[in-house]
Amino acid sequence: MLTHKPFRRNAQRSLRVPHWAIPKGRIFIAAKVTTIWWWRKGGTSYEHAVVVLRAKNIDGPYELHPDVTMMTSWHLPENPLQKSGHGSLLETHTGEWYLAYLTSRPLHLPGIPRLAAGGRGYCPLGRETGIARIEWRDGWPYVEGGKHAALTVPGPRMKEQGATGTGKWRTDFDSERLDPELQTLRIPFDEQLGSLTARPGFLRLYGNDSLNSTFTQSTVARRWQHFRFRAETQMAFSPRYFQQSAGLTCYYNSKNWTYCFMDWEEGRGRTLKIIQLDHNVAHWHLYDNPILVPENVENVWLRVDVDNLEYRYSYSFDGDRWQTIPLTFEAWKLSDDYIGGRGFFTGAFVGLHCEDISGDGCFADFATFSYQPKV
């Protein structure tokens, strides 16, 4: 049973709880006749941990776990699972105990020692969910095999159920509701952002603010879930001004993203370009020599290939013959660790975007959006 009674300050002082620990919640475990406090430490940074306290009485006094931190990877910079913490206990119907917790899988830049600045790595996938097997000793929960997160864990004593998920995903926008994998920025998807019925079988996005804005953006995106994947879309767009654009974006937040897009230039017509925002500093690619879109082309296909530390954009005017744009971007920069600040945890997104800072109105129609992990 979970309870939410605030932890008393005097109890915290009397315990001498480490200053970096923050109360997460209290669990009353009837079988152990014990109240256990779960504390998180370190946000979801590399110092993240689970801290446990217990008492026979719900009002205390409480005592700290003998190991202080019940789970953490802070002491093991080489461990493939880092930032482990924020745990919650589970007892199965077979009487076995597990801990569900948050963790991250960092990518490492070559040549940087683990204990140097940036050596712990960068996590473009954000925080993910891990599981650990728990054993009880003297009334305390311990992670089997040591307090660090592990890649493999013994399962419970029950019949295995086959899993068929591959991570492959595609939407053809043939429903009146967005696919559950897709998310929008700050506000729900509505008629101000776009429509799934204005042109059945297409996602129509109406031009709004730029990706640098913190107001209304017509952006529909999904999370990066693999270190290597390909995302692709088919788009029809007829801009009339250089301030109107639509295309494919790899996005962390309003100050860190890339955007491969179509716009319009006087004397050139429709063109393809790329903008990169890196710590809110803009880099303009292909502006001197943009890729020209033929006048007779109705649809343009855009693609991004993410390969561990790097990614690249490609385009096609017929969906079959592809041209890779000769620019390489750093995937590791779209991470919780690079962007600065703390408390985000989402990781990178790949998505569709349409903007119109002229205010005259425009829209882009997207026929498909797919995501394909690579082995």
Image (cartoon, rainbow, N blue to C red):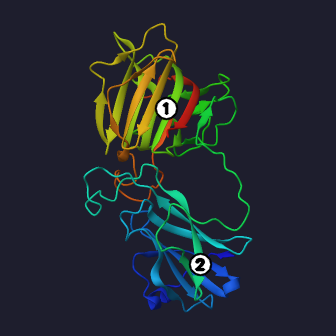
- Provide the residue designation for mark 2: 135
Q: Residues within 10 Å of mark 2 (few under 14, many from 20)?
A: some
Q: Position of residue 46 (x, y in %)?
A: 39, 64
Q: Secondary structure at mark 2?
A: strand
Label disc, if present, on residue 353 of the rendered structure: 1
Q: Residue at x 60, y 37 (%)?
A: 169
* In the displayed structure image, the side of residue 364 where residue 282 appears, left or right: left
* In the displayed structure image, the side of residue 106 where residue 161 appears, left or right: right
Label disc, if present, on residue 10 of the rendered structure: none
Q: Position of residue 305 (x, y in %)?
A: 44, 34
Q: Secondary structure at mark 1?
A: strand
Q: Residues within 10 Å of mark 1 (few under 14, many from 20)?
A: many
* In the displayed structure image, the side of residue 184 where residue 267 appears, left or right: left
Q: Is residue 184 above or below residue 21?
A: above
Judging depth in this view, the residue of 120 and 278 nearest the camera is: 120
Q: Residue at x 58, y 42 (%)?
A: 167
- Residue type, numbered disc 2: Glu
Q: Earlier in the sequence, mark 1 or mark 2?
A: 2
